[in-house]
Image: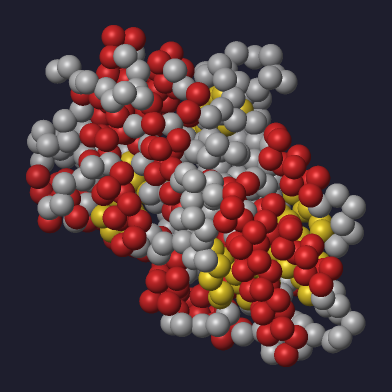
Amino acid sequence: MLVILNKNSFKFSNIGVYSKQLLNFNPKKKRKTIKHPYDEPRILRILCQRPYFTGSGINLVNLTKKTEERGLDQCIIFGQPIGESNPLADIIDEKNVLSVKFLDKSYSKKADIPFPIAGMSDQMPYESTKFSNFNETMLETYLKAFAQKLKKAISYFKPNIIQSHHLWLITSLCRVLYPKIPIIATCHNTGLRQMILASQLSDFMINPIKGIDAIAVINESQQRKVEKTYHFEISDKERNTFFYIGQGINTNIFYPSTISVTNHKSEESYSLIYVGKLNFSKGVPQLIKAFKQICQDEEIKCELFLAGSGKGKEKDEIYKLAKNEQNIHFLGQLEQEKLSNYFKKSDLFVLPSFYDGFPNVLLEALSCGCRAIITDLPGIKQTLEKTCGESEVVKYLPLPKMESIDQPKKDELPEFIKNLKELIKEQIMICKHEKKDLEYAKKVKTKFSWEALFNKYLDKYYELLSKNTASS
């Protein structure tokens, strides 16, 4: 079957074997299933990038921990720079960890993939390759390396469930290569964004993603985005592909503190914290500008803490904006325990992102007792209010008109900064006169625990195994 690619895609004659399999996959073709010797879930987990460093990486780590706690068998495939040690060594047996080695220029040994790890965002907190720069050769090399690890894992581990993160290339590859094994794909918004940013690759995802057995989405808003992005036909069968998982946080780490919940004293400073990548799409320059204006206009003492890392010109520009500002502090990449301690000492969490899904850091901050300001992006307010009820603890910053998926129009930014400044001042005034709302913090902690989220996945594992057995 010859597939005609869209105008932004590669020439069919130049692409490799695995690339062609993705393009030629027919999601409507009935797939045979196989009776598996294991009754309990035996899960192959896959992440195309590094654990820990991003939301999906932390998601993978927490799922891995919960699976080990429940005594279920699992095997993990992920990407990492060659020469680095196994980041999951203290969680899972070494024999069940397979990593795809990407180029690290400081390490001389030959890697599985001869370029830095491909990140699901164009700005990653480590050296990375943009998917938008992929050509035909890079794509085939990337798919082949992951296919070899998949083949090895399937051969010796014999999973009866595959769970892959991101509705992107490797999830698509899993569907095409292993049609008999039920697949759960977890949607992270960065995959939807890459369908636009790396549009030359989009045709390789459309059909395989529609063949996934179950797609985990945060809420209805994200489901609609997936349906539109991957051209789902509106039918009951395809709508049943989706299931809602919400979000989950590690409540053993992120929980409200009972210390220092009283009103601020006049001489004390107010602590604001941002957590995320140090790049423009997260609104970090606008946060710094709004904060500096508050410090100039008001007598209130404030401190701004920025947790996270960045690369290149955008990070350099952000550091330049904060230069010589003694009350702006860069914390770097923090382990979760340290991040929790900062949240518990902070008054206000601020995330003025121009594009995001449902960020875990928002829930982590709220669970520790912070007030919050977040851009009014689709699905966040609705999900929080539906789950925890309405609350003035969270304030929503109007999104500016956008030039592209994550770039605001420049003439909109002054108003955006002004609105952000006013919301920060409003939240600080509440902190000045009211105690921390620990009741709301406890509610977030209860409703968004990893225990509750993992149970939703576990139910889906058994459901898919039951269907697979019945149809084999």
Residue at the extreme front: 411
Q: Residue at x 89, y 59 (%)?
A: 326
Q: Position of residue 116 (x, y in %)?
A: 59, 25
Q: Residue at x 53, y 54 (%)?
A: 354
Q: From this viewpoint, is residue 46 visible?
A: no
- Relative vertical location of residue 356 with respect to residue 424 in this rendering, above or below: above
181 vs 21, nearest the viewer: 21
192 vs 60, nearest the viewer: 192
Q: Residue at x 57, y 56 (%)?
A: 412
Q: Position of residue 293 (x, y in %)?
A: 78, 65
2 vs 352, nearest the viewer: 352
- Relative vertical location of residue 14 with respect to residue 377 in this rendering, above or below: above
72 relative position to 181: left or right: right
Quarter holding residue 265: bottom right
Count of number-bearing discs:
0
Residue at the extreme top: 13
Quarter holding residue 368: bottom right
